[in-house]
């Protein structure tokens, strides 16, 4: 009898541990968000207000677009580290097209998107044709694209009436119609928030309710099985990296319209936030995989946390510690859950 009790005790402990990990995996991010909101609301009356939450949504719109691109590459079992540099290149190209060359708005919006397509094509060529691992290929592209945008601008940010190295001042200006994309409001919400919502919903519908979405997940889940099913895996991965590049370019355009200038290295600080948002999204309601709604939720958690810390006057240089801690926590819960699930199966 005692032997049976001793044997059942470890089983009970293991079962309790598994249940705790499973609960944290499903509801940990939601609980964290609620705790963050309640905590900062108790410290400041300005935190829990419509204006502040509108600002938070505006601030996370760019990160969410970057993170959606990373989400698509993770769905096909890849990873795109070049999104930050692609955003930076698109930011300065967008500004230069208006300020240096005085081009019409439709070209200003189209050409940076084509840059995103080009970066995505190069990434996919390195990965699917040459065979370089995703992390190494996109890491290389991150440096190449960063060098391109610094060379293109000669290390200068781009702004209205800026002096040119060749002499004189820039002939064009960022138009009011363009700035409205980043600074305007529609139906009581900032325009960037509407753009973010539309893109998140579009990504959700594509990934969860279309045949192509199922093919993307199938490719990431088992590329060999997908190939045997008649799926062109190289083409599917190529499309995912092109989408990632386009999302990064959209983020660059939105950033330029929001700040009213083309800032060099604008996307570099946002890369880690985007990656953290995606991995926090893994655990939202137990999804266990990259998904659009989870990515948005992850971006919201990070954005609300950083906003609250800003209100509390935490030095900006300490923010990376917080971002890293959130990423570590998300990865820990995700991989502990995956390990338990694998060992159980």
Image (cartoon, rainbow, N blue to C red):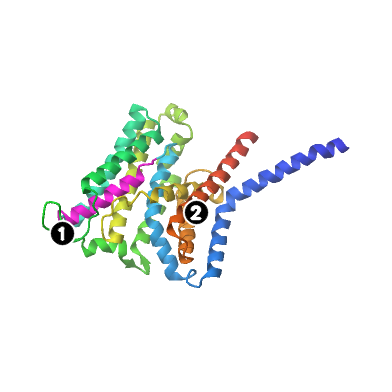
In magenta stretch: residue 84: yes
Taking the image as shown, residue 338 lies to the left or right of residue 98, namely: right
| Residue drawn at point x = 33 percent, y = 28 percent | 129
Residue farthest toward the right in the current orientation of the protein: 1
113 to 341, vertically: above or below: below
Examine the structure image and report whether residue 5 is included in the region drawn in magenta. no
Q: Residue at x 49, y 69 (%)?
A: 48
Stretch in magenta: 80-102
Element type at mark 2: helix
Magenta span: chief secondary structure: helix
Q: Quadrant of the rendered structure where residue 245 is?
A: top left
Instruction: Identify the image quadrant of the N terminus.
Output: top right
Report how far apart the C-alphas of labels 1 and 2 lie in the structure: 40 Å
**Residue 231 in the image, given as x and y percentages of width and height:** 40, 31
Question: Marks 1 and 2: which is nearer the front?
Answer: 2
* Residue 109 visible in this rendered orientation of the protein: no
Q: Residue at x 25, y 51 (%)?
A: 92
| Residue 142: % across, % down | 34, 41
Asked if residue 194 lies left or right of residue 336, the reply is left
Residue 187: x %, y % from top left: 36, 68
In the rendering, at what x and y percent does residue 227 appear?
A: 42, 28
Front position in the image: 161 or 56: 161
Q: Which residue is mark 2?
A: 322
Q: Is residue 215 above or below residue 58?
A: above
Count how many numbered circles sit on residues in the image. Answer: 2
The residue at which mark 1 appears reads as 172
Earlier sequence position, callout 1 versus callout 2: 1
Q: Is residue 2 visible?
A: yes
In the image: residue 266, left or right of residue 107: right
Seen in the picture, residue 147 relative to 307 is either above or below; the reply is above
Most distant residue in the left direction: 167
């Amino acid at each position: 009898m005692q032997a049976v009790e001793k044997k059942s005790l470890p089983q009970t402990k293991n079962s309790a541990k598994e249940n705790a990990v499973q609960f944290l995996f499903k509801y940990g991010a939601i609980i964290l968000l609620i705790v963050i909101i309640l905590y900062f609301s108790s410290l400041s009356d300005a935190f829990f207000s419509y204006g502040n939450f509108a600002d938070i949504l505006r601030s996370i719109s760019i990160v969410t677009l970057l993170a959606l691109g990373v989400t698509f590459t993770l769905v096909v079992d890849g990873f795109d580290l070049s999104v930050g540099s692609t955003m930076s290149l698109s930011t300065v190209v967008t500004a230069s097209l208006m300020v240096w060359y005085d081009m019409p708005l439709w070209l200003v919006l189209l050409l940076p998107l084509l840059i995103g397509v080009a970066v995505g094509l190069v990434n996919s060529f390195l990965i699917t044709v040459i065979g370089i691992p995703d992390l190494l290929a996109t890491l290389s592209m991150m440096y190449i694209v960063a060098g391109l945008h610094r060379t293109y601008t000669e290390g200068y940010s781009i702004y209205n009436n800026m002096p040119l190295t060749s002499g004189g001042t820039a002939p064009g200006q960022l138009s009011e119609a363009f700035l409205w994309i980043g600074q305007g409001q529609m139906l009581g919400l900032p325009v960037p928030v509407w753009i973010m919502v539309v893109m998140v919903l579009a990504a959700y519908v594509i990934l969860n309710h279309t045949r192509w979405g199922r093919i993307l997940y199938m490719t990431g889940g088992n590329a060999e099985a997908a190939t045997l099913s008649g799926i062109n895996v190289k083409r599917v991965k190529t499309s995912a990296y092109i989408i990632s590049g386009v999302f990064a370019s959209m983020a660059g355009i939105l950033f330029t319209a929001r700040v009213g200038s083309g800032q060099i290295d604008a996307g570099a600080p946002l890369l880690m936030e985007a990656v953290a948002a995606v991995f926090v999204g893994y655990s939202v309601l137990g999804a266990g995989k990259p998904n659009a709604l989870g990515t948005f939720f992850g971006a919201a958690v990070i954005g609300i946390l950083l906003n609250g810390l800003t209100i509390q006057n935490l030095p900006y240089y300490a923010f990376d510690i917080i971002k890293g801690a959130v990423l570590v926590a998300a990865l820990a819960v995700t991989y502990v859950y995956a390990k338990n699930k694998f060992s159980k199966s």
